Image (cartoon, rainbow, N blue to C red):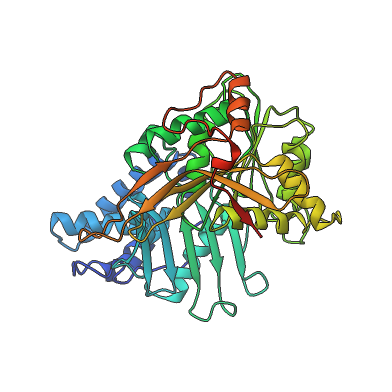
Amino acid sequence: MGPGPGAGSGDATGAGGDGTGHLVPAYRAKLLEEIDLAEMSTLSPAERRVRLERVLGHIISREGPVLATQDRALLIRRVVDEALGLGVLEPLLEDASITEIMVNGPDQVFVERSGRVERVPVRFASHEQLMQTIERIVSTVNRRVDESNPMVDARLPTGERVNVIIPPLSLTGATLTIRRFPRAYKLDELIQLDTLDEHMLLLLSSFIRSRFNVIVSGGTGSGKTTLLNALSALIPESERIITVEDAAELQLQQQHVIRLETRPPNVEGRGRITVRDLVRNSLRMRPDRIIVGEVRGGETLDMLQAMSTGHDGSLATVHANSAEDALMRLQTLASMSEVEVPFAALQDQINSAVDVIVQLARLADGSRKIVEICLLASHGRESFEIVPVSRFDARPMSPDARVHGTFTHLPLPRRTAARLAMAGEAVPPAFGVAAADAQLTTRQAV
């Protein structure tokens, strides 16, 4: 979408006191007068930026003002960002350490770095400039935002997840949230970050290779997608994997991967494709494994049925704060299907489908950890019974504002050890095998 009129920056960064912010609108207008829009459309984004910077440099040299080298470079950057990109948000988008950008009206911008949220000295010149930036963002995905359609949730072509909500629904002004997905971490990198330890990696590797069905559970921002992506690397290269996501985030490295993504309704309210539609369709695509980015509705029933009818080794995430909560949430979500299934029958379905629950948490210091790995030991229509086999025992926050603790590992049930052995996998020594089920630690989820 081309730049709209009057998208001035003001003192766009709100910091530095360089005095060039007030020059942005005028030089942006001069730049638009001198460039050939038809020619610009034939250039790549990088070439377009170089061309605009060169033309603007000539304009400033010809017409003034005389600026220090640093101020001149900043003015050129601001004007070109306004003409091509997202204005004051461009420097934030280029900062690899930022994982989330939160705009609460034109005067408040917050970012998340290393799990911590902080306010940054950035602001929009006006509500109109913020709306122009929002309109530019949503137009790249063929969406629009106005009073009749005041909420937009979409994924940009570059991968970021964007949520917009504007007045009258938002009482604090237009609100923009941009979630940037981190690069795909490898499991050994997650060990270095202390998300898990080597023993847990060995166990999870055995589970994935033995085709256990794994549910990754956690709260918002706990690292579910990051861990799911890392775990998927353990799937053999020879298998056909189908991923189903609301917004494509997974970055699988295997050769035989089919990526499916939902589609929102069009302007007329038609053409919507849901996660459930895609899960159902994936069953007709001869998958070896199905990976669902997050189950949050009736598609949970389809996923559970797939897991228990030959598509073992599948993975999914669910939003829950404990292993028990994850099981109850799966049951509730599955009941949202239009197929009326008794609650007890859903319990049977979950007991049949789910083998492992990996519980993640975001701790008080912003770090993400696997706080528990549990096995589902119940059968049929029994109440959910879980067997924890690994947990993180946290200590009180230390003076350095970090949460330290230790990973504790517990024996595996004999039935689980036997299934691993049938798949040619060994039980990691740190865990061992319980001599009898009576020696296991179990919990009921009610």
Q: Nearer the viewer, residue 263 or 88?
A: 263
Q: Residue at x 42, y 57 (%)?
A: 100
Q: As displayed, is residue 224 above or below residue 297? A: above
Q: Residue at x 52, y 57 (%)?
A: 162
Q: Nearer the viewer, residue 37 or 125?
A: 125
Residue 103 on image: x %, y % = 43, 68
Residue 215 on image: x %, y % = 60, 44
Q: Quick check: can you spot residue 38? A: no
Q: As displayed, is residue 419 above or below residue 4? A: above
Residue found at the very far left of the displayed protein: 68
274 to the left or right of 428: right
Q: Quadrant of the C terminus?
A: bottom right
Residue 290 on image: x %, y % = 67, 35
245 to the left or right of 158: right
Q: Residue at x 59, y 59 (%)?
A: 153
Q: Residue at x 63, y 26 (%)?
A: 419
243 to the left or right of 334: left
Q: Quick check: can you spot residue 332? A: yes
Residue 149 on image: x %, y % = 66, 69
Q: As displayed, is residue 95 above or below residue 197? A: below
- Total labels: the figure holds 0
